[in-house]
Image (spheres, rainbow, N blue to C red):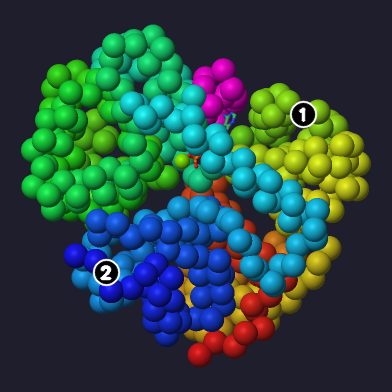
Amino acid sequence: MNTPFNNEELWQSVLAQIQFNISRPNFATWFHNTKVISNKNGEVLVGVPNLFSKEWLGGKYQSLILKILRSLDNNIRLVEFTVKSDNITNADLTPKKELLMATSLANSQMPFLDLKVDPKTNLNPRYTFENFIIGSFNELAHAAAWATTEKPGTAYNPLFIYGGVGLGKTHLLQATGNRANSIFPDKKIKYTTAERFISKIVEAIKNRTIEDLKQKAAKTDILIIDDVQFFAGKEKTQEEFFHIFNTLYQNQKQIILSSDRPPSAIPALADRLRSRFEGGMIADIGSPDIETRIAILKTKCEEKEATVAEEILNYIASNIQRNIREMEGALTRLIVCQKINQKEPSLIDAKKLLRNFIFSPKKTTSFKQILNVVASFYDLSPNDVLQTTRRQEIVKPRQIAMYLMRNELQESYPSIGRKFQGKDHTTAIYACEKITRQLEEDGILATELNLIKQRLYGELDVSKTSET
Ligand code: ADP
Ligand code: MG
């Protein structure tokens, strides 16, 4: 049966309704430059401009979007998000021409890399152990992954790797699959993302082919599933996966999983599955130190066959600290510009070019701005954030606001306490330490904080928009 809307109409109807459900700044941030790319077999694929939007929409708004989609067309069962950044229409950012060129060029190269994915294994040969840099932050994960390629199914089973966004989980998983594939060409190796896996299960249940799917899965020798935090709350998938897991495990087939958090922190995960995840080897990936970040940039330069001055690499590595993917994005932008202009940029050029990636500490903000921006980011009013309450949806934004006052305004702890309804200075210390600690392990929080800072410093000037 055909849907009554074409893609454009469908998405416009969704946007029209979403506007009523969330604040304007959030709407502007997350839904700008989005569109429905396809709507087939009950699966709607939404293109979004960047990874942040993808993660945010997938995490926070997926169920709302699905609900609205289903109210428009009840054949729709699933909504997925994919990064697709053609037709940039973002007038707020008005990037310079050269930047725009660099961005679109860089983006146009992405699908290239994806094209090489081996349809049999879903592995991308770009990810190897050779171009994976090891440091103390990831050496355990690396060693465990390597060991599974030597003796699949016996060394560590399952191998569960977790770490924040953009720190190399996918790279490591795929490198493992690629190496195993070259050592054991006869073994059946499958890489999939949890999202894809879920949609396969949903589809199979609908088409009553779930037994076939399970039988097929049972024939896999090495099953790699990326980002299993998305299994959260997907009861049916968890149930089916539990059986697949057991069959593979009993037959000594290797299972490798990744997640942005440890099994114990994945919400709505069935206990029996959680204990399976915890039953093998768990290894985390942390944040690389500066030397490692520079080493990573150097390998990326080699891969891209570009020479970038040492001082520029240093500049990137010392200013983009959280996330390797972001750092690589900055480097790619720089290299593309270099290729267009056919000359190496100076450090000054590089700084200009990377403005969007790096927050200048010289720009100023204020208590009021921090309060407004944090509140609007979390769909609250400034007064909500100031409230004395233990409600989790308020506590976190409040702690983030305190953290920003400390780190962006260098306010004293007693002064922060006073501004938050005369709280004691120890409350402010506790908040700042807690956020600092969480930033170490929680990639999503780091992303949120980055976005909040972007708003604070006017790259996306929505702070003035009033809340309703
Ligand atoms: P995650 O899956 O954890 O979000 P990815 O594996 O996608 O992160 O890594 C993001 C980018 O950083 C990729 O381009 C990847 O090649 C690169 N990267 C991550 N870790 C390393 C590393 N240790 N050495 C080299 N490149 C890395
Ligand atoms: Mg990944």
Amino acid at circle 2: Thr
Look at the magenta stretch and give its main secondary structure.
loop
Q: Does the Cβ of the disc 1 residue fall within 8 Å of ligand 1?
A: no
Quick one: label 1, few (<14), some, or many (20+) residues within 10 Å?
some
Q: Is residue 250 visible?
A: yes
Quick one: label 2, few (<14), some, or many (20+) residues within 10 Å?
some
Q: Are marks 1 and 2 in contact (CB under 8 Å)?
A: no
Q: Secondary structure at mark 1?
A: loop
Q: Quadrant of the N terminus?
A: bottom left
Q: Is residue 23 left or right of residue 157?
A: right
| Residue corresponding to mark 1 | 306
- What residue lies at 28% left-to-right and 74% top-to-bottom? 4
- What residue lies at 29% left-to-right and 11% top-to-bottom? 186
- Where in the figure is residue 21, as x and y percent of width and height? 40, 81
- Where in the figure is residue 52, as x and y percent of width and height? 53, 56
Q: Which mark is residue 187?
A: none
- What residue lies at 42% left-to-right and 63% top-to-bottom? 36
Q: Is residue 66 left or right of residue 247?
A: right
- What residue lies at 22% left-to-right and 24% top-to-bottom? 220
Q: Is residue 136 magenta?
A: yes
- Where in the figure is residue 374, as x and y percent of width and height? 58, 73
Q: Which mark is residue 3?
A: 2
Q: Which residues are magenta?
A: 126-140
